[in-house]
Amino acid sequence: MNTQATTSHDADTVLQPDVDAVVVGAGFTGLYMLIKLREKGFTARCIEAAPGVGGTWYWNRYPGARCDIESMQYSYQFDEELQQEWEWPERYAAQPDILAYIEHVADRYDLNRDITFETRVEAAAFDEDSNTWLVETDGGETIRARYFIMSVGCLSVPIKPRFEGAEDFGGEVYQTSVWPEEPVDFKGKRVGVIGVGSSAVQSVPLIAEEAEHVYVYQRTPNFVVEAQNRPLGKEEAAAIKADYKRYRQKAWEVQSAFLFPRHDESVFDLSADDRKARLDEQWEVGGLPFLGAFSDILTNDDANREVTDYWESRMRAVVRDPKVADLLTPDEPIGCKRLCSGTNYYEVYNRDNVTLVDVLDSGIERLTPTGLRAAGQDFDLDVIIYATGFDAMTGGVTKIAITGTGGQTIQEKWANGPRTYIGLTISGFPNMFNMVSAGSPSVLATMVTAAEQHGDWVADCLDFMRENGHTRIDATPEAEADWVAEVDRAASVSLRVKCDSWYVGSNVEGKARVFAPYIGGWPPYVAKCEAIVANGYEGFTLTT
Ligand code: NAP
């Protein structure tokens, strides 16, 4: 057992916290944390920047926004009644349905009374004398809490590149990740969309149905696989609900905590004909599960090349202009970046009112009063949409002025990439929990499942501390170093480290290149978290 127990201060002089925990963010993770804290008898304040609950699903309300994990799995499993009662209309839920679900959960468990909306946490500092956090909000409030729980999401800090002349543009400007609540009218308008990630892939086909013309400015092409979304049949849902518990349990046994048909064979175990048949079959499953066709797509370059070639044949069968198809073909392994799950994405480039503009060499040169200049050409636009991504994985944490022991800031601590112990904790930042983020499976698992696993772990940990009179928990530097090495080891055997992506932070200038989520798989990760507890919070220093 690695746990050390020490006494560091006189209990009589200790300042009492205002609440047991401050939770930052009211998305799936923050809401579940509130439920668990209340269940265990802890007091909590949740601080949320938006006017409502939902986190990423509050802000990302652009046309076509929907989840790429199946609805029956992208939902809470802690309450059998809740999961039995809720009905999802589609295989992959659209943003309004997900937001309605999250709002329903907040109402059902009466969570809003503990949430302060339209308020941001700006700073938090650990007070070593009292083993509490002082959390400052932009509302001028300072809250003293025993625990500081960051539930800020992995894709919650939008990036908006600063283009020369941006202030001169006289038209409408939107960003997919902070979309207005009121619907945007594109009728008769010339629209420019910057970026071709998932947000653009989902929105462009719908915008093109309305707009006079859509120009899509592409720097690096992405792989898009048809989502094969459809209404969710009542019988299909009923079959899952008949034994939902077992269904969820099966999901916990797979690497991504996401059930879909996946095959154990290598690409090269099958003859060329059988391989093609397998890929055809998996194409019909669609979306992210397409990568489940073979076991070695993300670990073997040659295997990946076979699947990439197959993907290209599917894309070229749709896109009529071969020059456009050339531009849409990525020069990297499929699945290296997160695969985009789309609906009629490639079809859109056969429309007369859609133009793909290659800006790989030129970039967006500048915005002008009437549009923008790119690829040596001026484009007249009424609307410009930034679909330019996020400071992913770490941005939500590092944008807050967080100070741990000895005056060390989180920005200093993570200057060369995120360092955590099981993702959840950061050595030198006692009593702080970093939920569903860097260093844990997070974006590589089903996020809602990950939120529940982390929420349970943290609530049990706080309970253990209360039972044993501990007021401080901190990961040891050694345990953290071992975990960082494990996160790196797991990433090193994946092709996913090979290309630029938000997984490695390369989309943010100056950010250290580190594969941020833990890619070792869901079951090993859960086993590690459980072993830590079984061994008396191994790898932590607990202080009474
Ligand atoms: P993204 O995948 O990071 O894509 C951003 C796009 O903007 C890229 O094409 C990027 O080009 C481009 N870009 C950035 N700066 C640019 C510049 N200065 N000039 C020209 N182009 C620029 O962001 P996202 O589409 O918002 O998606 C991020 C992640 O959010 C997804 O991978 C997914 O995990 C999640 N998401 C999921 C869904 C879903 O299907 N459920 C929907 C939306 C988002 P480069 O590639 O060349 O940098």
Image (tube, rainbow, N blue to C red):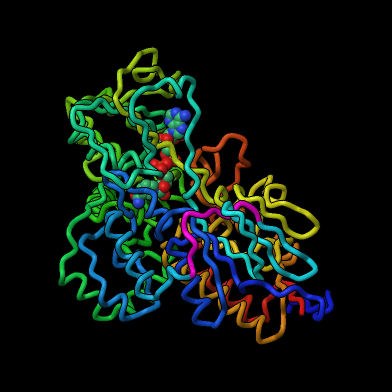
In the shown orientation, is residue 36 left or right of residue 275? right
The magenta span reads 114-123
Q: Residue at x 16, y 66 (%)?
A: 233
In the rendering, at what x and y percent does residue 185 appear?
23, 36
Q: Is residue 303 visible?
A: no
Residue sitting nearer the eye, 478 or 453: 453
Q: Is residue 304 above or below residue 49?
A: above
Residue sitting nearer the eye, 213 or 500: 213
In the rendering, at what x and y percent does residue 370 appear?
34, 18
Q: Residue at x 57, y 54 (%)?
A: 139
In the shown orientation, is residue 110 left or right of residue 477? left
In the rendering, at what x and y percent does residue 222 appear?
37, 37
Q: Is residue 97 above or below residue 247?
A: above
> On the rendered image, what quadrant is the C terminus found in?
bottom right
So how many labels did they put on this image? 0
Give residue 240's quadrant in the image. bottom left
In the shown orientation, is residue 273 left or right of residue 148? left
Residue farthest to the front? 140
> On the rendered image, what quadrant is the N terminus found in?
bottom right
Q: Residue at x 25, y 47 (%)?
A: 226
